[in-house]
Amino acid sequence: EDKVVQSPLSLVVHEGDTVTLNCSYEVTNFRSLLWYKQEKKAPTFLFMLTSSGIEKKSGRLSSILDKKELFSILNITATQTGDSAVYLCAFETSGSRLTFGEGTQLTVNP
Amino acid sequence: GAVVSQHPSRVICKSGTSVKIECRSLDFQATTMFWYRQFPKQSLMLMATSNEGSKATYEQGVEKDKFLINHASLTLSTLTVTSAHPEDSSFYICSARFWESYNEQFFGPGTRLTVL
């Protein structure tokens, strides 16, 4: 059965800290891995990763995929209170279907 | 670009009634739309995939006669929760993609359904 596991489930840090969120997966028909940020409403897209070892960056956020070890990490440097959210990892299989992990609740305190 | 809207954003209904939720792609033609459900403190669970003009494909465990999906045009999909019960109370989110989006899905803002 396909599954995706995120860790930690919850994380509390202070502004300025760097955080690393983990996502491991087992899937039979992998196409891509995606990261989303969810605040009060629907998820907003962060990254789509398809190739192993290639880091994607967007400002203070970066992510990388390891297809051999079946995991991905999302890094956030110099965290701000506005980074507080649930970060969701999902993998895409055939037909563009997404299977989401439980998410990591990140709280950044001032 | 690539904006998806949902209506209503929030609905409260009595047990036994049916509720229709609309999902619209505002500035693109959505070849595929997806419906998700999210219970409190849980992640999104894919309910069904719908392609314009064809029947929806439901995920295992999702009752197709209870959750009716219609994707009548390239910009509109509807989800009807029939004979809703309190356990159907959840956050329902749709997403849409188009051919040129390279499989990226654009999410709507979600609909909070509360069944009394």
Image (spheres, rainbow, N blue to C red):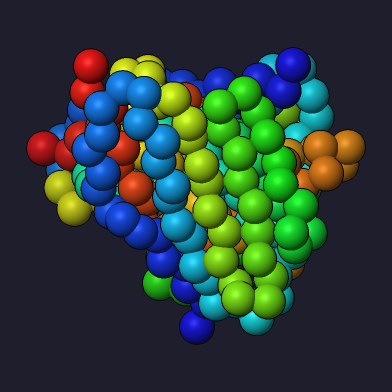
Q: What is the tally of numbered marks visible in this picture? A: 0
On the rendered structure, is A7 left or right of B58?
left
Quadrant the C terminus of chain A occupies: top left
Where is residue B26? Give x, y as percent: 69, 18
Q: Residue at x 56, y 27 (%)?
A: A60
Q: Residue at x 48, y 35 (%)?
A: A76
Where is residue B103? Give x, y as percent: 76, 47
Residue A82 in the image: above or below residue A53: above
Residue B21 in the image: above or below residue B31: above
Q: Residue at x 25, y 27 (%)?
A: A14
Q: Residue at x 80, y 29 (%)?
A: B29
A46 vs B3, nearest the viewer: A46
A23 vs A97, nearest the viewer: A23
Residue B18 in the image: above or below residue A85: below
Examine the rendering and report whether any part of residue B59 can be seen: no
Quadrant of res B11: top left
On the rendered structure, is A83 left or right of B3?
left
